[in-house]
Every structure is written in structure tokens, then in C-alpha cells.
Amino acid sequence: MVLSKAAPHSDVSVHSTFASRYVRAPLPRFRMPEESIPKEAAYQIINDELMLDGNPRLNLASFVTTWMEPECDKLIMSSINKNYVDMDEYPVTTELQNRCVNMIAHLFNAPLEESETAIGCGTVGSSEAIMLAGLAFKRKWQNKRRAAGLPIDKPNIVTGANVQVCWEKFARYFEVELKEVNLRDGYYVMDPEKAAELVDENTICVAAILGSTLNGEFEDVKRLNDLLVEKNKETGWDTPIHVDAASGGFIAPFIYPDLEWDFRLPLVKSINVSGHKYGLVYAGIGWVIWRSKEDLPDELIFHINYLGADQPTFTLNFSKGSSQVIAQYYQLIRLGYEGYKNVMENCRDNMLVLKEGLEKTGRFNIVSKEEGVPLVAFTLKDNSHFDEFQVSHLLRRYGWIVPAYTMPPDAQHVTVLRVVIREDFSRTLAERIVIDIQKVLHELDALPVRVAEAATVAVSSEDIGGDGATENIAKKTALETTREITNAWKKFVMDRKKMNGKINGVC
Ligand SMILES: *Cc1c(COP(=O)(O)O)cnc(C)c1O
């Protein structure tokens, strides 16, 4: 969805150099053209315009997969015309999604009997998965309260202030109060003790994150579980846990198998994971898994029969493509446990190369952890001359997209740069970006010094009444420099304004 900001008067035309071989008349930008154009021209025009998009492989801001094997690309293209919701017409696609749900449920240690099938579904991403899981918690809480004759008008959910925006969406769209545990200096995830304190009788669940968007850190789900077990015993409330494992769900099982964060913990009732992050599939797939049938209220499941046989559905949308489900199945069987482990270990190794490279510059504090999502989040040790936004901005010149963002309350004064290591981020790139970051630091270091120097020259040449030519050059240089600095600051302030939403450019 796009809420377009363009004014109607900017309906300037779109046309392509090569397409002039096919069409001469320019196309309006915001209105449908009156006439058709040849297919070759349509292709050329769009292809030309898309050249100006960034290179997805150099986008270090995103966790989302940007590379898959050509064999999988082939499968994707051949299933692009299948509607996932037509389960009766495409029973094999449905079967593949069920296999994925079961494989992932086992990966998360769901307590399943030998022949029992897992409860879960494919979604467009973790956001949809979280909406569904949140709705299940809300409905379960309502049912229990209603049966006990208690009010159901003030549900709340407890999270850390570091949650991804989808939790805020869930809270606002489905009218649940979001109770956030604030962060503090040097501690950028939800503190389980504080979360447990915020829980009350209206809490539908506590959402913990396995892989915080901001610094990749895994929250201590085990500690949270233990605290809530205690609190539930005291209060009789039964507060459950949801784990948002959007990025960590395909990491922890492979490289931290002993870490207890999943269905091994009794209060964890549902888990979401993004297939399109470390599940290694292109954008458009997520998963939500419930611990057992009892954790997904029946009344949320719809049964339809107008596409053929009876089929249960629990999604926010109806139609969607099948390709991503098929691609997820491809990755699961192609890579297997061993393959995923190799990919994740490789990402972790490259993360370490980058982290050590940055440490060696002596200019940064690292705020990500070695155990977590393979990313490096870092802040400038000294930001008195320039800050992280300027570093981010200058890195774009070298083609790198490295976001800078401020932390949520109460750590707003901390600005972080973040590089996400994906499968396609090689060691060479890790080494290269360190070099480019050093160049950027050099450039920024030089900036205030030049002002000082120019000012000094101008003043001293006036003082000593030196020859006119020298004085002119000096003054001009000072003026030019001042202009340069003013422009740099203007740009910087504008950029800053743009950044002032909650968190931009991170997903
Ligand atoms: C990316 C992310 C989401 C949202 O996931 P999508 O798959 O992009 O919808 C939610 N939570 C966390 C922790 C994430 O990293």
C-alpha cells in the first residue's frame, strides 16, 4: 500500500530511451494511458526505470533474503500463477505448506506425539503471523474472563520498547493496550523482571523477541518463563508467552541448540518466524506455530467449501501466491539441518570479521551481542564532531545502505548504525565495508579542521595586511568553506527530520 505524496500537477511523463523505437508518445505517470502500447515497450520502460532502484545485495539494512538458487527461482516462476488459497485445486501445494509447518514445529520442539500433526500456518510474513497469534491470545483471554463473569474491555499485552512496529500495529488495530518495558543505557532488550512486574489480570500475553530488530540480541525467554510460572502460581492468572522469532527462529535451532527459548518452555504457546529472513526465502512468507490445538480457539478458524471440499482457513487475507511456500519447502529439504547450520555459521563468522574490523578502528562501541542474529550494531565512541547519521549518509556514496536510528525510550539518546549479515554477504564485502567506513571517518574528521584552518588563514592575512591576492584567496576559501559547511548542515538537519519518525529504514 502506498499513500502517495505526489501532487497531481506532477503528473509528468515516463518514457524510455530504447522504447522510443516502439512508442514516441510519453506515458502519463499517475493516470492510466488512453491507448495500449506494445509489450516490448512496456517491458523496456519499466525495466529502465527500475535500474534506479538500489542494489538489493548491497542493502545491509534488511534481514530479508535477496538471493536464492536458480533452481528455486525456476520453481518460483513455474508456480507464480497458483493461488495458495485454492487448496482443493492445488492439493500438493497445500501438502507442502503442511510439511513446512510440521518441520518448523519440530524445529521449535513442539510437544507432538509420533503421529500428531502440528498446528500452524503460512502467512505473508511475521507481521500477519503476529496478528493471528495475538488474536488467538486475545480470544482465549476473553473466553476465560467471560466464563468467570469478569470484564473483558481492557486487554493489554506486555513487550519491550524494542518491539518491531508490527506489535504496535497489532495493539492499535485490534484494540489491545501495549505495555512496554522501557530500555536503559547499555541494555537494549526487554528486562524479564520488569516485564513480569507489568503483567496484570488483563494481560493476554507477554511477547518476547528472539533477535531484537535493533541490535539482534535474544531476549531471555527462559528467565521470563520462570518468572511468569511463579507469578501465575501466586495470582492464578495463567499469563502465556509468545515468542517473536522473526529473525532468530531460523538461527537459534542451528547454532545455539541448547538455548531454551521455544516450546521446551511450558508457557510458550505460540511462535512466529519469517521464512523470508533467515528462512532464506524471498519476501512474502512467514509462519506461526501453536503449541497445541487448545491454544488456537476454534471460533477463529473459518471453514469454506465454495472452492471444493471443506477447508479450514485462518489468515487475514484470502488469495495469495504459492511461490513462497514452495520456495520455503525447497530450502528446508535442499539445505536440511546441516545446510542451515552451515549458512548460519558462515553468517556468524562474517559478522565476527566485520565486528573485529570495526573494533580495530578504535572508533566504535559494539552494541550487538555475539550470540544473536548475525549483525553488527555500533555507535561512535566520540560523536561530538559528527554523528552516526552522517556516517550512514556518506556510506551511501560507496553504495552501502547502512541505517542509523535512535533507540526507543529510555535510550533515545543512543544512535546506532546497523549492518545485517545475510547469506549473500561475503567476507570480501565485510572487509570492504570496513575500509569504506574508515574512508568516511577520515572525511568527517577533516571537516571541522578545514573550517578552523580556513578561518585562521583569513584572519591572519587580514591582520598582517599581506598582499591582496593572498588575502583574496584566503577569504574566498573561507567563504566557500562556510558555504560548504552550511550546506552540509542543512542537508544533515533535513535528513535528521526525515529520521524523526519512530525508527526508519530498518526492517
Ligand atoms: C522483521 C520482524 C518482524 C516483522 O516481520 P515481517 O516478516 O517483515 O512481517 C517482526 N518482529 C521482528 C523481531 C522482526 O525482526
Image (cartoon, rainbow, N blue to C red):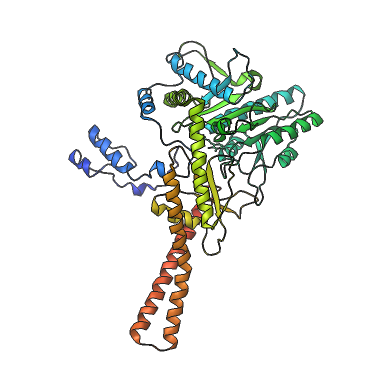
**Residue placed most toward the observer, 123 or 278:** 278
**Residue 28 appears in the rendering:** no
Rendering quadrant holding ligand 1: top right
List x then y, in percent, for residue 140: 68, 24
Asked if residue 206 is positioned above or below residue 451 in the image, the reply reads above
List x then y, in percent, for residue 251: 55, 33
Asked if residue 199 is positioned above or below residue 481 in the image, the reply reads above
Q: Given the current orientation, which residue lies at the most extreme top position?
A: 309
Going by the image, does 17 lie left or right of 249?
Answer: left
List x then y, in percent, for residue 348: 52, 40
- The residue drawn where x is 24% and y is 32% is 39
**Residue 408 appears in the rendering:** yes
Say which quadrant the N terminus sits in: top left
List x then y, in percent, for residue 80: 38, 25
Asked if residue 261 is positioned above or below residue 359 in the image, the reply reads above
Going by the image, does 474 lie left or right of 364?
Answer: left
**Residue placed most toward the observer, 353 or 126:** 353
Q: Given the current orientation, which residue lies at the most extreme left position?
A: 21
**Residue placed most toward the observer, 128 or 396:** 396
- The residue drawn where x is 52% and y is 43% is 375
For the image, the number of numbered tags is 0
Going by the image, does 255 lie left or right of 339?
Answer: right
Q: Given the current orientation, which residue lies at the most extreme bottom position?
A: 465
